[in-house]
Image: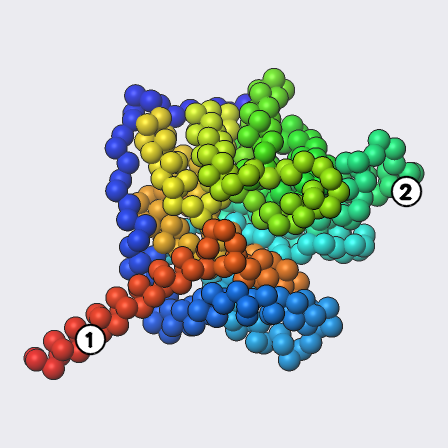
Amino acid sequence: MTALPGDPSLAYTPPAIDFLNTEIAFAHLSDAELRKTRWLFRLMNSPTLVRLGAPLMLWAAQYRLKWVEPIIRRTLFDQFVGGTTLLDCARNIERLARQDVLTILDYGAEGKETEADFNRTMNENIRAIDFAAQSSHIPVVSIKITGLARFGLLERIQHTRVLTRDELNEYRNVLKRVDAICYHAAQKGVSVFVDAEESWIQDTIDHLVWLMMKRYNRQRVVVYNTFQMYRTDRLQFLTESYDRSRREGFLLGAKLVRGAYLEKERQRAAQMGYPDPINPNKETVDDHYNTALRFCLDHIEHIAVCNASHNTQSVSVQIERMARKGIPPQHPHTLFSQLFGMSDNLTFNLARAGYRVAKYVPYGQVFEVIPYLIRRAQENTSVTGDISRELALVEKEYRRRKARRLRSGNAESQA
């Protein structure tokens, strides 16, 4: 097993990074692209518009309304999705690479129900691994278990000890699909992020990921589990996962996120009468997240951590901890990550300062990725206020460029 420690004797003063530097954040966008982004975020900043638009998008996806497809493609899709296919993503991957930003590929299939669909998703993930292996800019492919297994089966496994013969056969097929993806990644030198999902299927997912980590994380971190730190139990689960990995002799892969199913989780807990699995407030979530991040960095020789956050404070926590522990900015066990089309102020300023940072780039046909696009659009009504923040940054850069053009025009008129 390979250990990659930091060296406290090499502690350093971290670089001063201005995450409000919009010139660096949006240098990759032309003036026309910036105007389009500004227009889109203004629309998304309307909770009423988003609330009405989400069911319309789902309806359009259900009935494959062709006239709706180009509208979505030119708006939300272009902003938040890398392309319809791997080759279609190549332009965006190369564009990110020119700014020293890596790519995490994510095939946007989820909520599938048939064995044929599951096998197609598996094959697409294997193609993504092959595609990533040909590029030094794509270290990771992200997968979603509900794209490879029936939700009802995952739920039944979590809540019952006895499966029917057909369910056992179905579960064996799930194991084969997940193992085929992880085996291929191990052979090709690529890593796999396994997304977290709803708490009532997450134990099943955790078990699947555990099997894969135990099998493939002996020499390097191939497989990462995702820890949703808005859950009350995940900080303890992270430390227990580390202890168990040490006992069983393999490296732990930990992708840290705050979480994406808050309203659904709380509503189900209230309806079914079990304790709310979500931390009571944002301050507690932030504390758990940052504590988990520090824990991973303090054990960097045995944990590879992805700080998948749009939170500036959590990014700063990692920068400061890495400096204190003497962990170099390009340490292979560290990675920052933000979603494609969001938090460019974090991504590109981190890259400019020399840190290992990636964009999470989903891809797929327009109607396949609509659930993902709806989640992105709905973030403006969440407690984090992501779209409002994004809009403020875009507006700042728009004004900066406008002022620069005015100065340039005045200088030319005086020449």
The residue under label 2 is which amino acid type?
Asp
**Horizontal side, residue 116 vs residue 313: left or right:** right
**Residue 220 location, quadrant:** top right
Mark 2 or mark 1: whose residue is earlier in sequence: 2
Regarding residue 145, the answer to whether it shows in the image is no
Write the residue at 12% across / 76% down.
411
Rendered location of residue 391, percent (x, y):
40, 63
**Horizontal side, residue 42 vs residue 326: left or right:** right
The residue under label 1 is which amino acid type?
Leu
The color scheme shown is rainbow
Q: Is residue 34 above or below residue 316?
A: below
Residue identifier under label 2 = 166
Q: Quadrant of the N terminus?
A: top right
Question: Answer yes or no: do the residues labelled 2 and 1 have beta carbons within 8 Å?
Answer: no
Q: Callout 2 environment at 10 Å: few (<14), some (14 to 19), or many (20+)?
A: few
Write the residue at 11% across / 82% down.
413
**Horizontal side, residue 235 vs residue 349: left or right:** right
| C-alpha separation, residue under disc 2 versus residue under disc 1 | 70 Å
In front: mark 2 or mark 1? 1
**Residue 399 location, quadrant:** bottom left
Q: Is residue 189 above or below residue 371?
A: above
Q: Is residue 390 above or below residue 298?
A: below
Rendered location of residue 308, percent (x, y):
49, 44
Residue identifier under label 1 = 406
Q: Quadrant of the C terminus?
A: bottom left
